[in-house]
Image: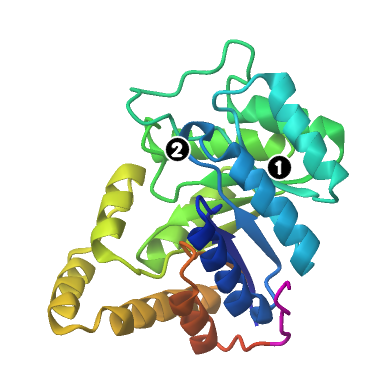
Amino acid sequence: MPNVSFEFFPPKSLDASFRLWDCVQVLAPLSPSFVSVTYGAGGTTRKLTHEAVTTLHRQTGLRVAAHLTCVDATRAETLDIARSYADAGITDIVALRGDRPKGSTGFKAHADGFASSIELIEALADTGSFNLSVGAYPEKHPEADSLNSHIEFLKRKLDAGATQAITQFFFESETYLRFRDACAAAGITKHIIPGILPIENWKGVQKFAAQCGTSIPPLIADAFTKAERDGHSDLLATALASELCDELLCEGVEDLHFYTLNRPELTRDVCRAIGIVPKTSLEKVA
């Protein structure tokens, strides 16, 4: 069976907090190798991310990875956050440059902050306290000149001290497999985990894909248009994500990272479809 991991959003309201906990309740029995909690654009959820990470770690016993970015913080502030994670027993960080704040035209480093994800990774690696993951784009980062330049930068991030990369979502297995082969040809030997997005909201996914440079195959776009018309979107989403995962597993992939969007049912159904069954139960916190 493959190893699975899940990504959550930090809650921004009381109702969202309950939804996150419900999501954890549904997915924790699938025994994830780790779960991660995202960081909002421009560092907007810094405190919420910290609270969600430490609470999940303390209350569930799950291995929790905290997203940490370079955006809108000094080096000292960023490393203080990292130290607080280490003090809480959290040893996994997803180190990212971070998305630019809404309304800005591009990434601008804080005057006293880390200028790039590589600088952040090097500083975190120097602490000796963390297992570090980084992001990767199988169709290149939207700001990269080419896929080759993106892969070269990915290699620099991994060489700086990261242990693995997690990709952005994609729609066809060949996209990941070509990327994996290109990374190997460039001398990357560390693990590259494919990111899987079961499609909960087709309109939202189209917008997200445009922002991160993910191409949408015409057949899939047409299928979702028809499925939405007929009220079968969830069935199609489950079938497509399950087929994608199965194809990856047949090509030797051993780990899958699911973007849950804090809506766990589709992710749970896809995991079951590829043979991952619940092993444990998670008691609710009183």
Give x and y (percent) for residue 162: 71, 42
The residue singled out by tag 2 in the image is 148
Q: Residue at x 32, y 51 (%)?
A: 208
In the image, taking residue 74 as reference, residue 203 lies left or right, namely: left
**The N terminus - image quarter:** bottom right
Marks 1,2: beta carbons within 8 A? no
Dominant secondary structure, magenta: loop
Within 10 Å of disc 2 (Cα), the crowding (few <14, some 14-19, many 20+) is: some
The reply to whether residue 252 is in sight is: no
| Numbered disc 2: secondary structure | helix
The image shows residue 107 at horizontal and vertical percentages of 44, 23
| Front residue of 212 and 49 | 49
Residue 284 magenta-highlighted: yes
Q: Which is nearer the N-term, disc 1 or disc 2?
A: 2
Residue at left offset 80%, top offset 49%: 91
Q: Which residue is mark 1?
A: 162
Q: Is residue 42 above or below residue 26?
A: above
- Decide if residue 163 is on the left or right side of residue 126: left
Badge 1 density bin: few <14, some 14–19, many ≥20, Cα 10 Å: many
Horizontal relation, residue 144 to residue 42: left or right: left
Q: Magenta region: which residues?
A: 279-286
From this view, report whether residue 143 is shown above or below residue 286: above
Coordinates of residue 231 in the picture (x, y in percent): 20, 83
Q: Is residue 53 above or below residue 27?
A: above
- Give the x, y percent position of residue 170: 39, 59
In whole angstroms, how far apart are the C-alphas of marks 1 and 2?
19 Å
Given this view, does label 1 or label 2 mark the residue nearer the observer? 1
Residue type, mark 2 in image: Asn
